[in-house]
Image (cartoon, helix red, strand yellow):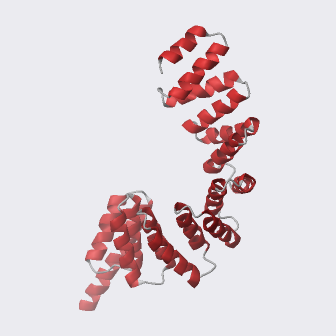
Amino acid sequence: ANHGFLRKNMNNQKDKIKQAASLHQAGDILGAKFLYEEVITAGAATAEVWHALGLIHAEVGEWQQAEAALRQGLLLDEHDQTLQLHLANILKQQQRFDEAKTILENLISLNPENAAAFNNVGTVYYALQNWPKARLAFETAIQLKADYIDAYYHLALTTLRQQDLPAAELTLRAILELDPNHPGALFQLGGLFLLREQYSFAIEPFEQLLKNHPHHLESHMNLAHAYLRLGRLSNAAMHYASVLAIQPDDEQALFNLGVINMQQGNLRAAADYYRRI
């Protein structure tokens, strides 16, 4: 009879774990957390349960609780590489970069084909502003996983930091081959063209970004700047107006709308914009 009770209790805990996972996937973080904690209290926690609970804590920025849960998971399965990756990310969020780097470099030594570990250690080097090591790590991640968009994007940011604009452009275009609507790549590519003063080239990436993110203030501002430099005043004014629709007291947009209206002979409208500064 006792064996039957234990078996029933074990099945009950397994059902709770499945239910918790479903709740978490559906966005019910509190419900999932409650069920995982019930499983732990019942003494039925596995490494996967502690892992899932750690991720829930991380989602709401509870870094210390997340770390504690993930370390409990590693006590049950010290070889779980995904758990170690997530622990390194939690440490990175707390700016404990040396500890994160140690975990990730150990993972790489155990599995030199772990693309995620290379990408993640690259982000640690990036945070430490060690651009050469960050770049090498991201390049290695891409060699291991040719469609690794996250590594491509981090590589692009790193090459921009190194002011290697040709490499940055190639990397951003590689991202857009994989995902033509990648907002970060579109924004950075447009920004790169602005940096080169290639204003006509900057227009397409920002316009593409705004198709899916019409309220992205910086893209409207950058587009307005590009159009202004090209002498296309009406287009510039339209995007400065979009900036004001999002942020009504933006001084740069108000000032430039004043300048545009002055150039177009709309003195009263220009004065109205200047008064709002």
Query: Quadrant of the rendered structure where residue 110 is?
Result: bottom right
- Residue 58 as seen in the image, left or right of residue 270: left
Looking at the image, which residue sits at the far left? 2
Q: In this view, does 5 lie above or below 87?
A: below
Relative to 257, say whether 12 is above or below: below
Q: Looking at this view, is 52 or 74 the one in front?
A: 74
Residue 19 in sight from this viewpoint: no
Name the side, left or right, on which 153 lies relative to 90.
right
List x then y, in percent, for residue 184.
61, 49
Q: Is residue 183 among what the camera can see? A: yes
57 to the left or right of 212: left
Q: Give me the residue at 73% from left, 36% from top.
A: 199
Q: State the residue at coordinates (59%, 9%).
A: 267
Residue drawn at (50%, 28%) of the image: 250
* Horizontal and vertical percent position of residue 196: 73, 42
Tell me residue 91's x, y (percent): 43, 68
Describe residue 50's horizontal placement relative to residue 210 as left or right: left
Quarter of the image containing the N terminus? bottom left
